[in-house]
Amino acid sequence: MRWNLRLAAAERGIWKSTEMRRLLADAGLEISAGKMSALWTGPPTTIRLDDLDVICAVLDCSPDDLLIREPEAVAARRPAAREARTATGDASKVTPRRGRNRTLPPA
């Protein structure tokens, strides 16, 4: 995921994090200067859904405008062995295993 807060804010005429922080405070979300700086300069490690809701209300946008999917990054993280199995069709084959204290299915 790519965090797009600065661009979304800029599209609405908000150019400084201090201005965004003031608007969020007016909407009822008090954010520390450090947390606002972190949100403004890069992707958050975590974000509360309530906070995201207030940010979207202030910017008059949806979460889709702030969080942009990156399918290429997900594909790049996929293990190579799994891709090889999928390419050859072996991924659909399932080999059942019997574990300790498990019963066999009815015959």
Image: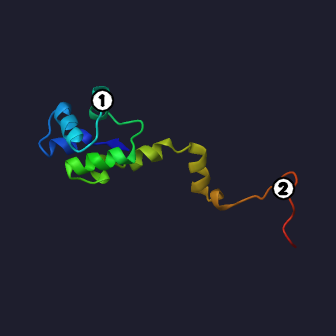
Q: Looking at the image, which residue is at 19% across and 40% down?
A: 23
Q: Which quadrant of the structure image shows residue 19?
A: top left
- Residue behind mark 1: 32
Residue 56 is left or right of residue 43, and the answer is left
Give the residue at the far left of this rendering: 13
Q: Residue at x 14, y 39 (%)?
A: 14
**Dot 2 amino acid type:** Arg
Tell me which corner region of the image, top left, top right, bottom left or bottom right, holds residue 21: top left
Mark pair 1, 2: CA separation: 54 Å
Viewer-nearest of discs 1 and 2: 1
From the image, which quarter does the C terminus lie in?
bottom right
Q: Secondary structure at mark 1?
A: loop
Quadrant in which the N terminus appears: top left
What amino acid is found at the position of numbered circle 1 in the picture? Ser
Q: Residues within 10 Å of mark 2 (few under 14, many from 20)?
A: few
Q: Position of residue 70 (x, y in %)?
A: 37, 47
Q: Residues within 10 Å of mark 1 (few under 14, many from 20)?
A: few
In the rendering, at what x and y percent does residue 79 appear? 56, 43
Secondary structure at numbered mark 2: loop
The numbered mark at residue 98 is 2
- Residue 6 location, x and y as percent? 22, 38
Left or right position of 64 against 98: left
Is 46 situated above or below 86? Answer: above
Residue farthest toward the top in the current orientation of the protein: 34
- Of the pair 67 and 18, the residue shown nearer to us: 18
Q: Which mark is residue 45?
A: none
- Image point 19% across, 42% down: which residue? 9
Image vertical order of residue 63 relative to residue 104, above or below: above
Q: Nearer the viewer, residue 79 or 28?
A: 28
Residue extending farthest to the bottom is 107
| Marks 1,2: beta carbons within 8 A | no
Residue drawn at 61 percent across, 56 percent down: 88
